[in-house]
Amino acid sequence: MRYNAAEQGYVSEKLTMLIVTDIESLRERLRAWRRPGTRIALVPTMGNLHAGHTSLIEHARASAERVVVSIFVNPMQFDRPEDLAAYPRTLEEDRCRLRDIDPDVVFIPAAETVYPRGMDGVTRVEVPHLSSIIEGASRPGHFIGVATVVAKLFNMVQPDVAIFGEKDYQQLLVIRRLVTDLDLPIDIVGLPTVREPDGLALSSRNRNLSPTERAQAPGLYAELRRFADRIHSGELDYASLEEQMMHNLKKCRFRPDYVSVRRAGDLAVPDGSDRELVILAAAWLGRTRLIDNVRLTLMNDR
Ligand code: PAF
Protein backbone atom coordinates (compact mmCIF):
# COMPACT_ATOMS: atom_id res chain seq x y z
CA MET A 1 0.00 0.00 0.00
CA ARG A 2 1.44 3.43 -0.87
CA TYR A 3 0.14 7.01 -0.75
CA ASN A 4 -0.55 8.50 -4.16
CA ALA A 5 -0.82 12.28 -4.10
CA ALA A 6 -2.43 12.49 -7.55
CA GLU A 7 -5.08 9.95 -6.54
CA GLN A 8 -5.41 11.49 -3.05
CA GLY A 9 -5.37 8.18 -1.24
CA TYR A 10 -3.66 4.88 -0.67
CA VAL A 11 -3.25 2.74 -3.77
CA SER A 12 -2.77 -1.01 -3.56
CA GLU A 13 0.64 -1.95 -5.04
CA LYS A 14 -0.80 -4.79 -7.12
CA LEU A 15 -3.98 -3.31 -8.48
CA THR A 16 -5.81 -0.05 -8.87
CA MET A 17 -8.03 -0.10 -5.79
CA LEU A 18 -7.96 3.28 -4.08
CA ILE A 19 -8.64 3.61 -0.36
CA VAL A 20 -10.01 6.97 0.79
CA THR A 21 -11.03 8.08 4.24
CA ASP A 22 -12.32 11.63 3.71
CA ILE A 23 -15.39 12.88 1.88
CA GLU A 24 -13.59 15.53 -0.19
CA SER A 25 -11.15 13.02 -1.74
CA LEU A 26 -14.02 10.64 -2.40
CA ARG A 27 -16.01 13.35 -4.18
CA GLU A 28 -13.00 14.52 -6.15
CA ARG A 29 -12.38 11.00 -7.47
CA LEU A 30 -16.02 10.44 -8.31
CA ARG A 31 -16.24 13.81 -10.08
CA ALA A 32 -13.51 12.68 -12.44
CA TRP A 33 -15.54 9.58 -13.34
CA ARG A 34 -19.03 11.00 -13.52
CA ARG A 35 -20.05 11.30 -17.14
CA PRO A 36 -22.88 9.99 -19.34
CA GLY A 37 -22.58 6.25 -19.82
CA THR A 38 -20.49 5.69 -16.69
CA ARG A 39 -22.58 4.12 -13.97
CA ILE A 40 -21.33 4.23 -10.41
CA ALA A 41 -22.33 1.43 -8.03
CA LEU A 42 -22.15 1.59 -4.24
CA VAL A 43 -21.93 -1.43 -1.95
CA PRO A 44 -22.31 -0.18 1.64
CA THR A 45 -20.87 -2.55 4.27
CA MET A 46 -19.78 -2.59 7.89
CA GLY A 47 -16.69 -4.62 7.01
CA ASN A 48 -15.82 -8.12 8.21
CA LEU A 49 -16.36 -9.05 4.60
CA HIS A 50 -17.43 -12.56 3.64
CA ALA A 51 -18.64 -14.35 0.50
CA GLY A 52 -22.03 -12.62 0.83
CA HIS A 53 -20.34 -9.24 0.40
CA THR A 54 -18.21 -10.64 -2.42
CA SER A 55 -21.36 -11.57 -4.33
CA LEU A 56 -22.69 -8.00 -3.88
CA ILE A 57 -19.44 -6.46 -5.12
CA GLU A 58 -19.21 -8.84 -8.06
CA HIS A 59 -22.76 -7.93 -9.03
CA ALA A 60 -21.81 -4.25 -8.73
CA ARG A 61 -18.83 -4.89 -11.03
CA ALA A 62 -21.10 -6.46 -13.63
CA SER A 63 -23.71 -3.69 -13.49
CA ALA A 64 -21.61 -0.52 -13.35
CA GLU A 65 -18.38 0.91 -14.75
CA ARG A 66 -17.17 2.11 -11.34
CA VAL A 67 -17.60 0.39 -8.00
CA VAL A 68 -17.36 2.02 -4.58
CA VAL A 69 -17.35 -0.17 -1.45
CA SER A 70 -17.82 1.58 1.89
CA ILE A 71 -16.70 0.11 5.18
CA PHE A 72 -18.15 1.86 8.20
CA VAL A 73 -19.34 0.33 11.46
CA ASN A 74 -22.19 2.77 11.99
CA PRO A 75 -22.61 3.48 15.71
CA MET A 76 -26.05 5.03 15.16
CA GLN A 77 -27.65 1.73 14.20
CA PHE A 78 -26.58 -0.19 17.32
CA ASP A 79 -29.21 -0.17 20.03
CA ARG A 80 -26.87 -1.82 22.59
CA PRO A 81 -23.35 -0.45 23.27
CA GLU A 82 -22.04 -3.97 23.97
CA ASP A 83 -23.20 -5.06 20.50
CA LEU A 84 -21.28 -2.16 18.91
CA ALA A 85 -18.17 -3.02 20.96
CA ALA A 86 -18.38 -6.72 19.99
CA TYR A 87 -18.90 -6.05 16.27
CA PRO A 88 -15.94 -7.66 14.46
CA ARG A 89 -13.54 -5.15 12.93
CA THR A 90 -11.15 -6.85 10.51
CA LEU A 91 -9.81 -4.10 8.27
CA GLU A 92 -6.62 -5.89 7.26
CA GLU A 93 -8.48 -9.06 6.23
CA ASP A 94 -11.09 -6.93 4.46
CA ARG A 95 -8.43 -5.16 2.43
CA CYS A 96 -6.94 -8.50 1.36
CA ARG A 97 -10.34 -9.83 0.32
CA LEU A 98 -11.09 -6.61 -1.58
CA ARG A 99 -7.76 -6.72 -3.37
CA ASP A 100 -8.95 -9.92 -5.08
CA ILE A 101 -12.20 -8.31 -6.27
CA ASP A 102 -10.57 -4.95 -6.97
CA PRO A 103 -13.34 -2.33 -6.59
CA ASP A 104 -12.33 1.14 -7.81
CA VAL A 105 -12.63 2.88 -4.45
CA VAL A 106 -12.91 1.67 -0.88
CA PHE A 107 -14.28 4.40 1.36
CA ILE A 108 -13.35 3.86 5.01
CA PRO A 109 -14.43 6.95 6.96
CA ALA A 110 -13.89 7.43 10.69
CA ALA A 111 -16.92 8.09 12.92
CA GLU A 112 -15.81 11.77 13.15
CA THR A 113 -15.96 12.01 9.36
CA VAL A 114 -19.51 10.69 9.16
CA TYR A 115 -20.74 12.41 12.33
CA PRO A 116 -18.46 15.46 12.75
CA ARG A 117 -20.79 17.02 15.34
CA GLY A 118 -21.44 13.71 17.11
CA MET A 119 -24.73 11.87 16.90
CA ASP A 120 -26.77 13.81 19.48
CA GLY A 121 -29.10 16.27 17.85
CA VAL A 122 -27.93 15.45 14.34
CA THR A 123 -30.55 15.25 11.54
CA ARG A 124 -31.94 11.73 11.25
CA VAL A 125 -33.85 9.92 8.55
CA GLU A 126 -36.87 7.90 9.61
CA VAL A 127 -39.00 5.69 7.40
CA PRO A 128 -42.14 5.54 9.54
CA HIS A 129 -43.93 2.30 10.40
CA LEU A 130 -41.57 0.00 8.43
CA SER A 131 -38.81 1.02 10.87
CA SER A 132 -40.72 0.24 14.02
CA ILE A 133 -42.21 -3.19 13.33
CA ILE A 134 -40.67 -6.70 13.62
CA GLU A 135 -36.86 -6.18 13.69
CA GLY A 136 -37.43 -2.48 14.45
CA ALA A 137 -39.61 -3.37 17.45
CA SER A 138 -36.85 -5.64 18.80
CA ARG A 139 -34.12 -3.06 18.16
CA PRO A 140 -35.58 0.42 18.76
CA GLY A 141 -33.82 3.12 16.71
CA HIS A 142 -31.91 0.58 14.61
CA PHE A 143 -33.52 1.45 11.28
CA ILE A 144 -33.27 5.19 11.94
CA GLY A 145 -29.52 4.61 12.25
CA VAL A 146 -29.47 2.52 9.07
CA ALA A 147 -31.60 4.98 7.06
CA THR A 148 -29.55 7.95 8.28
CA VAL A 149 -26.17 6.48 7.39
CA VAL A 150 -27.38 5.07 4.08
CA ALA A 151 -28.86 8.46 3.13
CA LYS A 152 -25.54 10.10 4.05
CA LEU A 153 -23.56 7.54 2.01
CA PHE A 154 -25.92 8.09 -0.92
CA ASN A 155 -25.26 11.83 -0.70
CA MET A 156 -21.50 11.35 -0.42
CA VAL A 157 -21.23 8.91 -3.35
CA GLN A 158 -24.33 9.79 -5.42
CA PRO A 159 -24.37 6.32 -6.97
CA ASP A 160 -26.56 5.23 -9.88
CA VAL A 161 -27.09 1.85 -8.24
CA ALA A 162 -26.67 0.49 -4.72
CA ILE A 163 -26.54 -3.21 -3.83
CA PHE A 164 -27.76 -4.85 -0.60
CA GLY A 165 -28.25 -8.42 0.61
CA GLU A 166 -31.69 -9.93 1.17
CA LYS A 167 -30.58 -11.47 4.46
CA ASP A 168 -31.46 -8.10 6.00
CA TYR A 169 -34.81 -8.17 4.26
CA GLN A 170 -36.52 -5.47 6.32
CA GLN A 171 -33.48 -3.20 5.90
CA LEU A 172 -33.76 -3.62 2.13
CA LEU A 173 -37.42 -2.53 2.22
CA VAL A 174 -36.61 0.44 4.48
CA ILE A 175 -33.95 1.57 1.98
CA ARG A 176 -36.25 1.09 -1.01
CA ARG A 177 -38.89 3.23 0.71
CA LEU A 178 -36.34 5.88 1.66
CA VAL A 179 -35.20 6.19 -1.95
CA THR A 180 -38.80 6.42 -3.21
CA ASP A 181 -39.93 8.93 -0.57
CA LEU A 182 -36.88 11.20 -1.02
CA ASP A 183 -36.91 10.92 -4.85
CA LEU A 184 -33.33 9.70 -4.97
CA PRO A 185 -32.37 8.60 -8.51
CA ILE A 186 -30.74 5.36 -7.34
CA ASP A 187 -31.61 1.79 -8.37
CA ILE A 188 -31.73 -0.40 -5.29
CA VAL A 189 -30.77 -4.00 -6.01
CA GLY A 190 -31.38 -6.78 -3.48
CA LEU A 191 -29.43 -10.03 -3.91
CA PRO A 192 -30.21 -13.48 -2.47
CA THR A 193 -28.67 -14.53 0.81
CA VAL A 194 -25.43 -16.49 0.47
CA ARG A 195 -25.38 -19.58 2.70
CA GLU A 196 -22.95 -22.09 4.13
CA PRO A 197 -23.42 -25.62 2.72
CA ASP A 198 -25.47 -26.49 5.85
CA GLY A 199 -27.87 -23.57 5.21
CA LEU A 200 -26.59 -21.03 7.75
CA ALA A 201 -26.83 -17.53 6.27
CA LEU A 202 -23.42 -15.87 6.03
CA SER A 203 -23.15 -13.09 8.59
CA SER A 204 -20.38 -11.18 10.31
CA ARG A 205 -21.89 -12.32 13.59
CA ASN A 206 -21.32 -16.03 12.86
CA ARG A 207 -17.72 -15.73 14.00
CA ASN A 208 -19.00 -15.05 17.55
CA LEU A 209 -20.64 -18.51 17.71
CA SER A 210 -18.94 -21.18 19.84
CA PRO A 211 -18.32 -24.53 18.04
CA THR A 212 -21.45 -25.99 19.71
CA GLU A 213 -23.56 -22.97 18.74
CA ARG A 214 -22.17 -23.09 15.20
CA ALA A 215 -23.38 -26.68 14.93
CA GLN A 216 -26.87 -25.63 16.14
CA ALA A 217 -27.12 -22.42 14.09
CA PRO A 218 -28.38 -23.97 10.79
CA GLY A 219 -31.53 -24.93 12.77
CA LEU A 220 -32.89 -21.41 12.21
CA TYR A 221 -32.95 -21.79 8.42
CA ALA A 222 -34.12 -25.41 8.68
CA GLU A 223 -37.12 -24.28 10.76
CA LEU A 224 -37.88 -21.45 8.31
CA ARG A 225 -37.86 -23.95 5.43
CA ARG A 226 -40.12 -26.31 7.35
CA PHE A 227 -42.52 -23.41 8.03
CA ALA A 228 -42.55 -22.46 4.32
CA ASP A 229 -43.20 -26.09 3.33
CA ARG A 230 -46.22 -26.23 5.64
CA ILE A 231 -47.68 -23.07 4.07
CA HIS A 232 -47.02 -24.52 0.61
CA SER A 233 -48.85 -27.68 1.58
CA GLY A 234 -51.96 -25.70 2.47
CA GLU A 235 -51.72 -24.70 6.15
CA LEU A 236 -53.08 -21.18 6.46
CA ASP A 237 -53.18 -20.52 10.19
CA TYR A 238 -50.05 -18.36 10.18
CA ALA A 239 -50.35 -17.38 13.86
CA SER A 240 -50.33 -21.01 14.92
CA LEU A 241 -47.40 -21.81 12.59
CA GLU A 242 -45.46 -18.87 14.06
CA GLU A 243 -46.10 -20.18 17.57
CA GLN A 244 -45.01 -23.68 16.60
CA MET A 245 -41.79 -22.40 15.06
CA MET A 246 -41.04 -20.36 18.21
CA HIS A 247 -41.57 -23.55 20.22
CA ASN A 248 -39.34 -25.63 17.89
CA LEU A 249 -36.58 -23.03 18.05
CA LYS A 250 -36.65 -23.16 21.85
CA LYS A 251 -36.35 -26.95 21.67
CA CYS A 252 -33.23 -26.45 19.48
CA ARG A 253 -31.71 -24.20 22.20
CA PHE A 254 -32.47 -20.86 20.50
CA ARG A 255 -34.02 -17.95 22.37
CA PRO A 256 -36.31 -16.64 19.63
CA ASP A 257 -37.06 -12.93 19.39
CA TYR A 258 -39.74 -13.22 16.73
CA VAL A 259 -41.08 -15.35 13.93
CA SER A 260 -43.40 -13.50 11.58
CA VAL A 261 -45.10 -14.19 8.24
CA ARG A 262 -45.60 -10.99 6.30
CA ARG A 263 -46.51 -9.73 2.86
CA ALA A 264 -43.21 -9.61 0.95
CA GLY A 265 -43.74 -6.18 -0.64
CA ASP A 266 -44.49 -4.08 2.44
CA LEU A 267 -44.36 -6.36 5.50
CA ALA A 268 -48.08 -5.94 6.17
CA VAL A 269 -49.82 -8.81 7.96
CA PRO A 270 -51.02 -11.01 5.07
CA ASP A 271 -54.60 -11.92 4.40
CA GLY A 272 -55.78 -15.00 2.51
CA SER A 273 -55.39 -13.32 -0.88
CA ASP A 274 -51.69 -12.46 -0.56
CA ARG A 275 -49.41 -14.64 -2.69
CA GLU A 276 -45.95 -13.12 -2.15
CA LEU A 277 -44.90 -13.79 1.43
CA VAL A 278 -41.78 -13.65 3.55
CA ILE A 279 -41.17 -15.43 6.84
CA LEU A 280 -38.80 -13.45 9.04
CA ALA A 281 -37.12 -14.73 12.18
CA ALA A 282 -34.57 -13.58 14.74
CA ALA A 283 -33.19 -15.75 17.52
CA TRP A 284 -30.34 -15.77 19.99
CA LEU A 285 -27.86 -18.58 20.34
CA GLY A 286 -25.90 -17.82 23.49
CA ARG A 287 -24.73 -14.22 23.06
CA THR A 288 -25.15 -14.12 19.29
CA ARG A 289 -28.32 -12.88 17.62
CA LEU A 290 -29.07 -14.40 14.22
CA ILE A 291 -31.65 -13.23 11.70
CA ASP A 292 -32.83 -14.95 8.57
CA ASN A 293 -35.82 -15.11 6.25
CA VAL A 294 -37.43 -17.19 3.53
CA ARG A 295 -39.50 -15.85 0.64
CA LEU A 296 -42.37 -17.83 -0.82
CA THR A 297 -44.82 -17.45 -3.67
CA LEU A 298 -48.17 -19.20 -3.38
CA MET A 299 -49.90 -20.65 -6.41
CA ASN A 300 -53.10 -18.95 -7.53
CA ASP A 301 -55.19 -22.13 -7.39
CA ARG A 302 -54.95 -22.48 -3.59
O1 PAF B 1 -26.16 -4.12 6.20
C1 PAF B 1 -25.21 -3.47 6.67
O2 PAF B 1 -24.05 -3.91 6.72
C2 PAF B 1 -25.48 -2.09 7.26
O3 PAF B 1 -26.72 -2.05 7.90
C3 PAF B 1 -25.36 -0.96 6.22
C4 PAF B 1 -26.41 -1.09 5.13
C5 PAF B 1 -23.97 -0.97 5.63
C6 PAF B 1 -25.58 0.40 6.91
O4 PAF B 1 -24.65 0.61 7.93
Image (tube, rainbow, N blue to C red):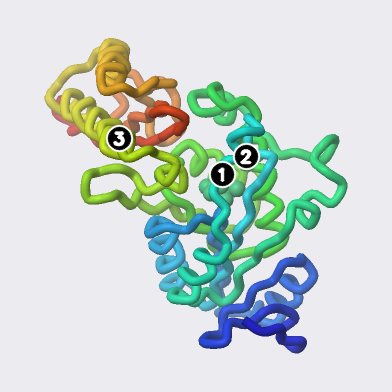
Q: Residue at x 30, y 31 (%)?
A: 220
* Direction from residue 264 to residue 177 in the image, left or right: right
Q: Earlier in the sequence, mark 1 or mark 3?
A: 1
Name the residue carrying label 1.
Answer: 87
Kind of residue sitting beneath label 1: Tyr
Q: Nearer the viewer, mark 2 or mark 3?
A: 3
Q: Are marks 1 and 3 in contact (CB under 8 Å)?
A: no
Compared to residue 46, the image places residue 227 above or below, namely above
Kind of residue sitting beneath label 2: Leu
Residue extending furthest toward the front: 211
Name the residue carrying label 3.
Answer: 212
- SS type, badge 3: helix
Q: Earlier in the sequence, mark 2 or mark 3?
A: 2
Q: Residue at x 52, y 85 (%)?
A: 15
Q: CA distance from mark 1 to mark 3?
A: 20 Å
* Direction from residue 253 to residue 170 in the image, left or right: right
Viewport quadrant of the C terminus: top left
Compared to residue 237, the image places residue 31 above or below, namely below
Viewport quadrant of the N terminus: bottom right
Q: Are marks 2 and 1 in contact (CB under 8 Å)?
A: yes
Residue 27 location, x and y as percent? Answer: 74, 71
Q: CA distance from mark 2 to mark 1?
A: 5 Å
